[in-house]
Amino acid sequence: MNRYVSNIKHLLLLAGLVGANCSSARPVTKELPADKNATSQTINLYNNLKKVAQKGFMFGHQDDLAYGVNWKYENGRSDIKDVAGDYPAVYGWELGGLEANAEKNIDGVPFKKMRQYIKEGYERGGVITISWHARSPFGAEKGAWDTTHGTVASILPGAANHQLYKSWLDELAKFFLSLKGSQGEAIPVLFRPFHELTGNWFWWCRNTCTPEQFKVLWRFTLYYLREEKKVHNLLYVYNTSGDFKTKGEFLERYPGDDIVDMISFDSYQYDDPAKSDWFVKNINFQLGLISEIAAEKNKLTALAETGYEQIPFANWFTETLLKAIGEHKISYVLLWRNHGYNEWMKKMHYYAPYKGHGSELDFLKFYQLDNTLFEKDIAKEKLYTD
C-alpha cells in the first residue's frame, strides 16, 4: 500500500496538484485563498472574515431557513428570527444525496429549495457553509456511516471506485456552479468536506484509512473541483472531531497549508453544565490550540458544529457557550439543526431556541452582546465587496 500511495502522489505531482502554484491574471492586492483563481467575491469574503474575527464571532445555524421546531418550508421563517428578530450570520447546509442525483438531501431538504435559501441568505449579506455526508463508495445502505476499512483507498486515482467518486464530484460541481447571486455572480461557500475526519464513524475517518490516504483524497478533491470543473467559489474548511489533545493530533491528517483556508472542529455538550465545566474547559483549550496553529499558518478558525440537544440548561448560551469560546478570535460558531420530533430517535431533536423555549431570554442576552454577530451585524460589513 505504501508503494501505491507513493505512485498516487507522483501522479498528483505530475497533474500539478501537489505543491501547485496556480497563476492568475488578477493583480494580487489581497491575500489569496487556496484557490488562487477564486472569484473576487470569494477572495473578498476570505479577507473580510479575517477582519471581522477581530470584532467578534458570527452565529450560525444548520438548515435555519428550511424548517424549525413544529414548522417546515414557511417563507422567510427562522427559529432564530422568531426569537431574536434577526437571522443567523451563517447558514449551514448539507449535500448528502446530491452525489446520487437525489432530489432531496439526507435530511429531506429539496436541493431546489436549498439553492433558493442559499441565495436569500447571501443576498442579505449572510455566509454559507456546506457539509457533505456522501454515501459509502461500497454501497448506499450504510450511507456515510460505513466504517469498513479501505473505503478511501477504493476511490483514489487508479482504484476501483475512482470513476464513481469523480461522478460524485461532477454533481457537486454542478450544484456549486449553479449558486448565483442577483447579478449572476457565483455565491461563495465555505465547503467543509469529510467533516469530523478524526472520528471513527464515517467512511473517511481515521479507522478506515491512513493519514496519507486521507491527504491524497483531500488534495484530489480540491484539484478536481478547481482545475477540472472550474469551481472557483469555494473556501476549504478542514474539520476534525473534538477528540484532539495536542496540535500534533489535530494536524495528523492535515493536507497542507496550500490547500486549506479554515481550520475547525466539532464538539457537542453531553453532560450537565450545572454539574460539570468539562465542556467549557475543553472547548476553550482546543480553541487555544487551533488558534496557535492558525497564527502559525495564517488560517481562519471556527467551531464548525456544536450545541446542547434540547438546551435543558436555560442559561447555556451566556454561561456555557460564551465562556467556552472565551477571548478566542474565531470566525463563527454553528449550532446543529432544529429538526423537531425525530421519529427514528423517538425524541425532540433541536439545538437552537425557538419561540417559547426556556432558553429564549438567555439567547436574547447572547444576541445583544457586542461580540456575537448575527445577520444584521454582518450585513454592515459587506463581506463580499472590497
Image (spheres, grey):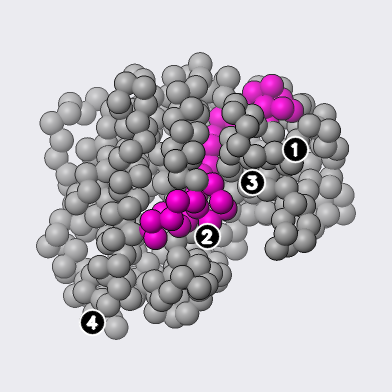
Residue 127 appears anywhere in the view? no
Instruction: Give neighbour class at mark 1: few <14, some 14-19, many 20+ (Cα, 10 Å).
Output: many
Q: Which of marks 2 and 1 precedes in the sequence?
A: 2
Residue that mark 3 sits on: 337
Instruction: Give neighbour class at mark 4: few <14, some 14-19, many 20+ (Cα, 10 Å).
Output: few
Q: Position of residue 98 (x, y in %)?
A: 41, 54
Residue shown at 23% from the left, 39% from the top: 36
- The magenta span reads 80-109
Q: Quadrant of residue 64?
A: top right
140 or 212, which lies in front?
Answer: 140
| Distance of label 3 from label 4 (alpha carbons) | 43 Å
Residue that mark 2 sits on: 196
Residue shown at 63% from the left, 47% from the top: 336
Residue that mark 1 sits on: 353
Q: Amino acid at mark 1?
A: Pro
Instruction: Give neighbour class at mark 2: few <14, some 14-19, many 20+ (Cα, 10 Å).
Output: many
Quarter of the rendering occupied by the N terminus? bottom left
Q: Position of residue 377 (x, y in %)?
A: 57, 20
| Distance of label 1 from label 2 (alpha carbons) | 25 Å
Residue shown at 50% from the left, 73% from the top: 141
| Distance of label 2 from label 4 (alpha carbons) | 28 Å
Q: Which mark is residue 3?
A: 4
Q: Which of marks 4 and 2 precedes in the sequence?
A: 4
